[in-house]
Image: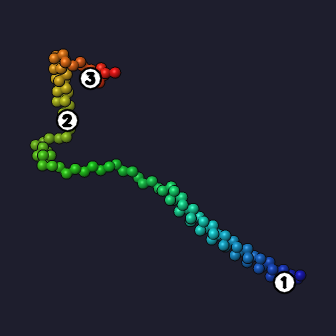
Amino acid sequence: MDIEQQMARDERAMERIATALDQISKSLAAWCILESAKFDKHYPVKANVRDATITRTPSDEDKLLESLGATDEPLEEWIGLREQQVVLEKIAQGSASPRPSGADKK
């Protein structure tokens, strides 16, 4: 075999190797796309969870109370005095103990 024949043979072998590597790279790229789609399907990206938005249209009664200066916040003094008064009345009547009724039962 002379050198020219061997060079031609090597050149054909290199072209076949290059073609094979090109096909391998295309196959790997397609496989990567498929695996990426499979991963995205099995493990979807979680969306940011937002707090619920509660909307309520004010009624005529709400509008009237607002125009009179009412607020949704309870008055601490009124609640405290009323509760004290109810507890003192029940103790004076002797019908209730200062403890809640659920604590007596076992």
Q: Quadrant of the C terminus?
A: top left
> Which residue is the site of mark 3?
101
Residue occupying the point 19% across, 51% down: 57
Coordinates of residue 30 in the picture (x, y in percent): 59, 68
Question: Can you identify the residue that label 2 sits on?
Answer: 74
Q: CA distance from mark 3 to mark 1?
A: 109 Å
Q: Which mark is residue 4?
A: 1
Of circles 2 and 3, the one toward us is 3
How far apart are labels 1 and 2 at the CA level? 103 Å
Q: Residue at x 56, y 64 (%)?
A: 34
Q: Secondary structure at mark 1?
A: helix
Q: Secondary structure at mark 2?
A: loop
Please say if 82 is above or below 10.
Answer: above
Q: Amino acid at mark 2?
A: Pro
Q: Is residue 88 above or below residue 46?
A: above
Q: Which mark is residue 84?
A: none
Q: Tell me: residue 42, above or below residue 69.
A: below
Q: Along the horizontal axis of the image, is 24 left or right of 54?
A: right
Q: Earlier in the sequence, mark 1 or mark 2?
A: 1
Instruction: Please identify, in this view, whether the residue under mark 3 or under mark 1 is nearer the observer.
Output: 3
Return the disc, 2 or 3, that comes first in the chain's sequence. Answer: 2
